[in-house]
Image: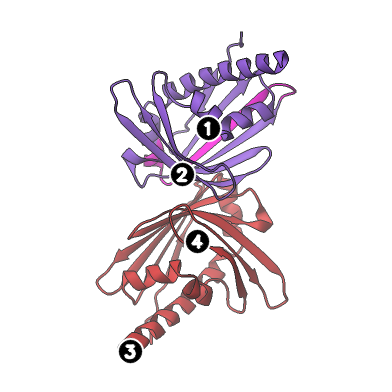
Chain colours: A purple, B red
Amino acid sequence: MTSKNPTTVTAQPGTPFIDIVREFDAPTDAVRRAYLEVELVSQWLGPNGYEIEVGTWDARTGGSWQFTHRDPEGNAYGFRGVFHSITDDQIIQTFEFDGWSGHVSLESLVFEDLGGRTRLVNRSVYQTVEDRDGMVESGMEQGLSEGYERLDKLLAASDAADVKG
Amino acid sequence: MTSKNPTTVTAQPGTPFIDIVREFDAPTDAVRRAYLEVELVSQWLGPNGYEIEVGTWDARTGGSWQFTHRDPEGNAYGFRGVFHSITDDQIIQTFEFDGWSGHVSLESLVFEDLGGRTRLVNRSVYQTVEDRDGMVESGMEQGLSEGYERLDKLLAASDAADVKG
């Protein structure tokens, strides 16, 4: 069983930032891999009940990514961006939703080592405060929490597999 | 002779934005090409007296760019980023200075058609207000103005060449 790790989302009024902090009961290397390796990403990213179809996933500095989420009714939601840089403890990438074209954000993901556990510190910045407000109002938070809960399970299962192996 | 087109740089205190507005006495297509085609970019970008060495210039959605500026004393300043998207009237790209690694910005360049002339509207957003302040304090404004003046001349020369041709 994984412990309950709350997701903290902060969006200070009048700023273009969204700050997300989440801890995971797994080492930084395992969490980082779950963000970079497409076979892992496709197992946890997004709201419950959505299917993911990955078009492009070139997880290296200068690489691109693209995937489509499909909800249970079959509606499609496309997302794409580029990896500006990938280092040992940070990923910096751009993010754009096809249904809201031209509203691009820059996202930094830092994986802090808590000694066998990991704190993910995620800052997104938008090109305007209005864009940021639009993203917050889109209901992103539920999909985010559901994705992290599936990631908790994936990390726990990988850990169990490692112990068995 | 080109007319004097002032460069307006706005950096509201407490925000992570830098807004630059500049007009050019040339059509949008010519100005856009001067930002995208490496043979043109390398003729105007940067402060006076600097040499430019382009490492990578893949001006397409998902492409990367990298160049190094050398000042008259031979000091090298490297810059790199990725093109998130390139459309008919907008370029969205990331930007990072090697000497200030990890401080990445997202830049939008819009080319507004003024009927034979062009207004360039450039917004950069940084991941923190402190990063933005650091960039403003770096003395970026002089190099920017000098580059735009060389771009004025390049556009005037291209225009003259087109008329002769």
Q: Which residue is mark 3?
A: B165
Q: Where's the C terminus of chain A, which quadrant?
A: top right
Q: Are marks 3 and 1 in contact (CB under 8 Å)?
A: no
Magenta range: A114-132
**Residue at mark 3 shares a chain with residue at mark 1:** no
Q: Is residue A20 visible?
A: no
- Element assignment for label 3: loop
The mark found on residue A81 in the picture is 2
Amino acid residing under circle 4: Asp
The furthest residue to the front: A165
**Crowd class of label 3 (few under 14; some 14 to 19; many from 20; radius 10 Å):** few
- Could you give the CA–CA distance between mark 3 and mark 1, rounded to whole angstroms? 55 Å
Q: Residue B48: within the magenta?
A: no
The mark found on residue A19 in the picture is 1
Q: Which residue is mark 4?
A: B58
- Could you give the CA–CA distance between mark 1 and mark 2, rounded to whole angstroms? 19 Å
* Numbered disc in front, either 4 or 1: 4
Q: Position of residue A49 (x, y in %)?
A: 39, 18
Q: State whether residue B30 is above or below residue B123.
A: below
Q: Is residue B113 visible?
A: yes
* Numbered disc in front, either 1 or 2: 2
- Could you give the CA–CA distance between mark 3 and mark 4, rounded to whole angstroms? 29 Å
